Structure formats: C-alpha cells, structure tokens
Image (cartoon, rainbow, N blue to C red):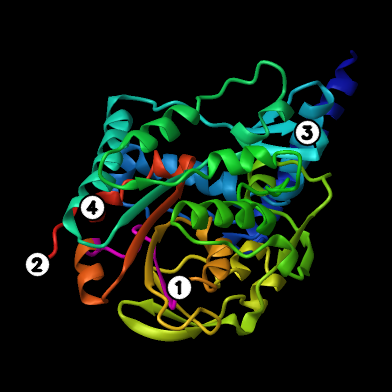
Amino acid sequence: MTKKYAIFITCLFAAFLGVFAVANAVTPTKEFSPMENRALAQMPELTADSLSTGAFMSGFETFVTDQFVLRDEWIALKAGAEYASGKRENNGVYICDEHTLISRFDPPANDRAKKRIDDNFGYVEKLAGLTDAPVYFSLIPGKVSVWADLLPDGAPNDDEGQYIARGAALQGPKWLDTNTALNAHKDEAIYYRTDHHWTTLGAYYAYAALMEGMGRTPKALSEFDPTVASDQFFGTTFSSSGVRWLEPDTIEFYVPQSAATVTNYFDDNPTEGQLYDMSKLEEKDKYAAFLGGNKPLTVVKSNVAPEGAPKLMLIRDSYADSLAPFLCYHFSEIHLVDPRYYKTSMAQYVKDNAIDEVLVLYSVSNFVKDGNLFVLGMAAK
C-alpha cells in the first residue's frame, strides 16, 4: 500500500465518520421506535454527580446508540448478514423454520429470580384462600414449547413444562389445562409467526379448554365467522429480532363487536372502550386492537350471555385480550385486571364487585418474570 493510497483511505474513512456525525447532529431526537415497539433513550442530564460517577457517559452511549441515524436499516443489515453466515439467533430471538420467530426462554438467572417464581405460585395459592369465590388457574405455554420442532438444532431453552406442572399441583386454586389443547392443535396457526401471542384461533382452543374445565359447554368453532382485520401485522418478536424479510401475519376477529360494551379504567376514571379498537390497526402494534391494548382495568359487559350469567374476574396478561371476546357467551361481566398497573387487593375487588368466579390466566414466560403478583396475596379489608 502506497503512502498516497493510505492517506486516501484515511481521509475517506474520516469523511464517512464525519457525514454520520453531522447526520446524527441534525436529525431530531426520537422518543419512540415504532419498529422496535419501545421507548428510545434520551439525552442524559449533565451534572457534576453524573459525570463523576460515569452515569452520564453510560447514558450518553445508550442515547447515541438508540438515536443513530438509519438505526432500523443498520439493524436489518446486521441481522441479514448474520443470517447469511449461518447464525439463527439475534437479540434473544431464534430464526426458525417456516419463517417463524421464537423468543428464547431462559432459566431464572439467580436466586432472586427463583424466589420470585416461588412467590408468584404462592400468591395464586393464597388468593384461593382469601375469597369465597372459586379461583381457577392456568398457565399458557408459548410457541417455544408447542412449536419446539421449529427451533434450530441445539437451541438452548428452559423447560416451560416444569412450571405448568407446578401450577397443576397447587392445592388451593382449581387447575385448568390449556397446554394439552394447544399441543393437540400444534399443526395449526395457533401462534403468530412474528409475535409472541397466540392467534385468535389459538385463543379459541384455549377458551374451549377453559370452559370445559369450568363445567361449561364452549361454542363450536363452526359457529364463528372469522373476519380478517389486518394482513399486515408484524409483532414484537419481529421488532426485537432485526429480521425484516418475513411475510406479515394476519389478525382475525371471531366474535362480533356488538357482543359487548367495554369500559376502561385509569385511576378509577372510566372511559369508553371496544372489544376491538380499529384505530390500533393503523399502528405498528396491531395486536393492541384487541380491547385497545394494555389497561389497568377493563370491564366487559356482555350483550350475548344467558340471563343470570355470573361475573368473572380475569387476572391476566395480554394473552387474555384476544380471548376475552369468547367469554362474553358465558359471563355477564368480565373484569380484566392487569396487576402491572392495578395495585389493589384482588380479594377486596372480588368483594366490592360481587365477583362470582376468578380466573388467573398467564403465559408461562410472563408469569415467571412478573414482579407484581403480590397483589393476589393481599387480604381484603
């Protein structure tokens, strides 16, 4: 390499860095990434304390990474290059057969994480003893278990089955098995390929299993006339994986919008909702069309339940959003409570709202990580 050529390469590289430095400087700071479905880091506050402790530089590094110009394009380029080299995992997501993305399921990282799991099972057990209403419990397996055959060879994962077995062994609540039903239909499109949730079809099979376990007769699948709400859904695993070459998923609605009236509560202030918030279909997170997405408390009043049907309290994660419409055929009211945002005694809520039955329904992956389930163990006044 000649000296002139070395100087040329050095200047070219410096110019490359300069162009991106200027572009980053003039590009407006973004607060949210629709593609990644998360808030982006903002410029940290510069203080003597943050500078001396190193917090400013750490925060600034994260800020620059999150706000880097053409970030989405660079992420996609990186994922594509790694896939071409044979790598089948990116950012905790496995790139699997049949154009499917599956999030890795890790074992608890430390004793604190193990204790949280033990505590969560204990809170469900305790809730059953705090209320006279019957308490049902079910854990939903993820596609990391049901679709394990699609995983890359040798992909390491913790076993969701051990937690399902622990739930079934609890003495207080009555166990409802959704695992068997979902595995019986594993060859069908019961999960989204680009998202961690089940599809409406998967939610139907779980609904049928839940109703049978609660002594009710579920509506037959043939009684529904599914409508396509969107055929352009890219979910959470798509967002985090960096993979951008997959075909989108399709979202379907089975139960008509008119089957219920919906009220959402934020800090006890009611606002009108819907079984399906059609405006969410114009956004990146189209799964939020079911009940409008995460809410502290949502009360669904059925227009199709039999006269005298009981009230159900559903303590849940977001999987229940697409399952709740099916429950309208069996319950006069469904009170959906998300303990992440609704911090009150569940036993007290049962008492105050004349709840007849309680169902704790969580995906395994969320149940083992949720640090908010202590509200299940809080006694009523």
Which comes before the other along the chain, label 1 or label 4? 4
Residue at the spot x=81%, y=39% of the render? 99
Residue at the spot 61% in from the left edge and 51% down from the top edge: 197
> Marks 1 and 3: in contact by CB < 8 Å?
no
Q: Quadrant of the C terminus?
A: bottom left
Q: Secondary structure at mark 4?
A: helix
Tell me if label 1 and label 4 are in contact, CB under 8 Å. no
Q: Which residues are magenta?
A: 332-346
Answer left or right for 146 relative to 95: left
Q: Which residue is mark 3?
A: 13
Circle 2 — which element?
A: loop
The percent position of residue 129, horizontal first and vertical second, equals 18, 51
Residue type, numbered disc 4: Leu
Q: Which residue is mark 2?
A: 381
Q: Label 3 sits on what residue type? A: Phe
Q: Could you say which disc has been placed on residue 175 in the image?
A: none
Please report whichever mark, 3 or 1, sits nearer to the chain's N-terminal start: 3
Label 1 sits on what residue type?
A: Phe
Q: Give the dominant element type of the magenta stretch: helix, strand or loop.
A: loop
Q: CA distance from mark 3 to mark 1?
A: 66 Å
The answer to whether mark 4 and mark 2 are in CB contact below 8 A is: no
Q: Which residue is mark 4?
A: 127
State the CA–CA distance, disc 1 to disc 2: 27 Å
Looking at this view, is 199 or 351 the one in front?
351
Residue, disc 1: 331
